[in-house]
Image: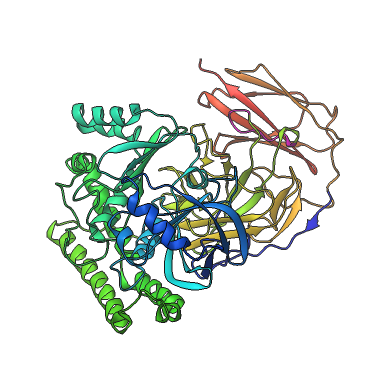
Amino acid sequence: MKQILFSVLLLAGSIPVLHAQNDGDNLFNPNVLHEIRFESPDENFLPQLINIFNNAPIGEVPYISGTVRIDGTLISNVGVRIKGGISAYAPKRPLKIDFNRYVDDQQYDGMTKLNLQNADVDLTVQREALVYDMFRKAGVKGPRTAYAKVYFNNTYNGVYIMLEQVDKNFLRNYFADDEGTLYKNKTCALEVDAGPVTFEHIEALNEILATLSGDAFREALENALATDAFLRYFVLHHFINAVDSPIDVGCNFYVYHEPRSGLLNWIPWDYNLALYNGANYSVLETNTANAIFNKMMTEPYYRDRYLQLACDMLKYVLNENYLYPRIDNHVQLILNALITDPYYTNFNNFDVSVAQLKTLITNRKTSFVNDLADLGFVCPNFGNTLDFQDIVINEVVASADSSGGIADPEGGYPDWLELYNNSSANVSLDGYYLSNDRDFLKHWAFPPGTQIGAGEYLIVWADRDVQESGLHADFKLDKSGGQIYLSHEDLSFVDSVDYADQTTNLALARVPNGTGNFILQDPTFNASNAVSNTSVPAELPLELAIHPHPVTDLLTIRINTGDLIHPASFRILNVLGQPVSTLLLQNNPTTIDVRHLSPGIYYLNGTIGQARIMKKFLISGK
């Protein structure tokens, strides 16, 4: 077998983004103070925008065509307008850019729209940036932010917070399917913002709330709502003291119905009034403006899960250790730009405002801890039970097709990755995640109850087909290069891999198995990556025939090599890629008894010398 050495950076702790794998990775790099210039021969371009806004009906502000230069890249004929509600009347006007308003399919870094937030009334100029980061670290799919200095021609207009638009691009980055209905709640009523115009999913959820309780309520809700993300969303809303929010007035959020999972997802939006003194919600407000949350808190299972999530989040994101460094990083990034910001007239109070923000965070954390104690809720043990690389990303195929011969349980040929347990213990993967996005580590959670045995393998299909049997992540791998991260709830890394351009049906595999550097080689699906160079290969090509199919009791296996020079070693794998049986074929053909296995889809995964072969089969019910 030809093996090509391949340099791969294995990363732990602080990890740089080495490939811009996802749309917007460059634009929303939070460690860069970007530069945005609106360029126009008309020196009155900004006054013209203001005049159009002042004379437009509410919610119907038209765009005008403009030219923008972002970090040196010129984009012509983009739509520009003033955006927002009350904040739109501030001296520093918030802005929206629509890159494809006048030019079909025009984008910048994969983005079609960009919001420029003016941080009105926020002397720290970072509350929104901090809050959206908290949502994402908690596992709630929310927009990204970054900072930019904005100019109109050569006139500096100040520091803005760039905010990702919730649109088709956003849905494509974070959900298994972007063809569902996106609802927006801006005026305390849902309206369709994108996708099929239907309210059937909202109506079905309302029916569940109105008619069911107990186990029936929980079973129906789990099939209608992304419940864990929804509870995380509300833990954060209670912590950040946001007013004009889903808690107090029921406004300012998106809801997305993701078709493949069939679940509704709440998406955070509009936090210019977050992290201020005033509301001081307790950890558990049970009479909010959201009827779903209120009903869930009457059910012991969801109430306990909510409080457990509050405990967990206090330990990894809702505390000084996580948030203070983020605040300081923001200060360092924007401080000099604020000094010359023409609209930032309270610079002498900047340090005081930052200190007040930190004090608020400490007080909110203390309040949550005291609330949990008053409720008599004892936080369960929390933390990563694995050391770095106890579980490894052992093999990756980032470009696959039918000629590779490795099919998922539904007969497709998607990209896949293999995990291997280096430890001596069986490991539960509850609380662990896979992601292709360094800025959103909690992209895909392992389903409850997923385990990987000591010295065993686990296959995850990277195809977004979350509705299919087996383990299917809600993201795909990019053939041209990217990253894959295996992490824990507490944001610690168990393993990570950075890879460059891949060849279809070749695997990036650790050799020696589980511990070595990566090489490119033929896939060794659910088996050791180490292949002996002294083994005599079986005659190629190999073909494996089985009958009957489907099978109920006895399965006959035939390999087309005639006499076997080497015994054929086979493992039977379930749809999760876990071995359920091992057999050694001394004769060809051989008949085996499969009556001890439950009906379902299985794989025969075999090794003959250096050659490997795999076949999917179905055991039918008796």
Residue at position x 38%, y 59% in the image? 132
Observer able to see residue 28: yes
Start-end of magenta stretch = 404-411
9 to 442, vertically: above or below: below
Whether 405 is among the magenta residues is: yes
Residue 114 picture location, percent across and down: 48, 55
Whether 583 is among the magenta residues is: no
Q: Name which quarter of the figure residue 578 lies in.
A: top right
Q: Main secondary structure of the magenta part?
A: loop
Residue at position x 55%, y 62% in the image? 40
Q: Nearer the viewer, residue 235 or 60?
A: 60
Residue 48 picture location, percent across and down: 43, 58
Residue 398 picture location, percent across and down: 66, 47
Q: Left or right: 70 with respect to 428?
A: right
Q: Nearer the viewer, residue 78 or 315?
A: 78
Q: Nearer the viewer, residue 553 or 508?
A: 508
Observer able to see residue 491: no
428 to 18, vertically: above or below: above
364 to 219, vertically: above or below: below
Residue 68 picture location, percent across and down: 56, 60
Q: Left or right: 197 with respect to 111?
A: left
Residue lying farthest bottom? Answer: 348
Q: Name which quarter of the figure residue 104 lies in.
A: top right
Q: Nearer the viewer, residue 160 or 267?
A: 160
Residue at position x 49%, y 42% in the image? 168
